[in-house]
Amino acid sequence: MSRSKKLSIEVLGTSITVLSQNDEDYISLTDMLKAKDGDFFIGDWLRNRNTVEFLGIWERVHNPGFNYGEFDTIKSQAGLNSYRISVKDWVEKTNAIGLRATAGRYGGTYAHKDIAFEFGMWISAEFKVYLIKEFQRLKDEENDRLKLSWNLQRTLSKINYRIHTDAIR
């Protein structure tokens, strides 16, 4: 069973959802796209040859089940004016794990944090810097809460130990 929690960060006036699942963080590309001026889509980013190459390298490092044959076909077409691919097609064809697209009211496109930071650069260099800064702030706050929780549990155990030993005496 997977543990999942949704958090939110604010980057240059745009609220961005961060989904933590099984100790991996996925950031909403759909939310990030709201910060880009004009009518752009995630598919526009996926058309870029550099994007496809980056995704392929990331998957090679993190995904033993990645479909290299299909990736080579996609890579050969990337950058052409006629080339189009959706996140759903990318995941289905290559067995990718770095991108996720979910439909429905609370759906959207999510990317592993490494990939989301690269997407942030596509939006703007400034956006990427602030995205990384806010994401790190979120992680630091999370770690601080975990430290407090651990310290509280340690203190409770110490008190319970004393109660139990006093009861036995």
Image: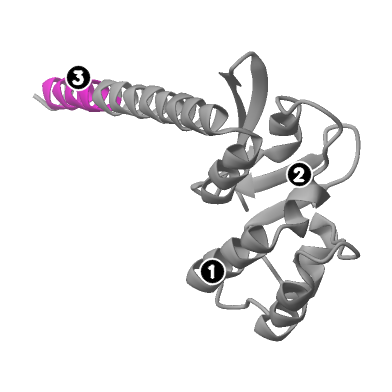
On the image, the x and y values in percent for residue 141 come to: 39, 22
Q: Which residue is rendered at x = 41% and y = 23% of the image?
A: 137
Looking at the image, is 82 positioned above or below residue 139?
below
Query: On the picture, is 64 further left or further right than 85?
Result: left
Residues tagged 3 and 1 counted as in contact (Cβ below 8 A): no
- Foreground of the two, 67 or 107: 67
Disc 3 marks a residue whose amino acid type is: Ile
Give the image quarter of residue 5.
top right
Q: Nearer the viewer, mark 3 or mark 2?
A: 2
The quarter of the image holding the C terminus is: top left
Q: Which mark is residue 159?
A: 3
Binning the other alpha carbons within 10 Å of mark 3 as few (below 14), some (14 to 19) or many (20 upward) gives: few
**Magenta-span inclusion, residue 159:** yes
Q: Is residue 140 magenta?
A: no
In the rendered image, which quarter is residue 7 located in? top right
Which portion, as a residue range, is magenta? 153-166
What colour scheme does the image use? one colour
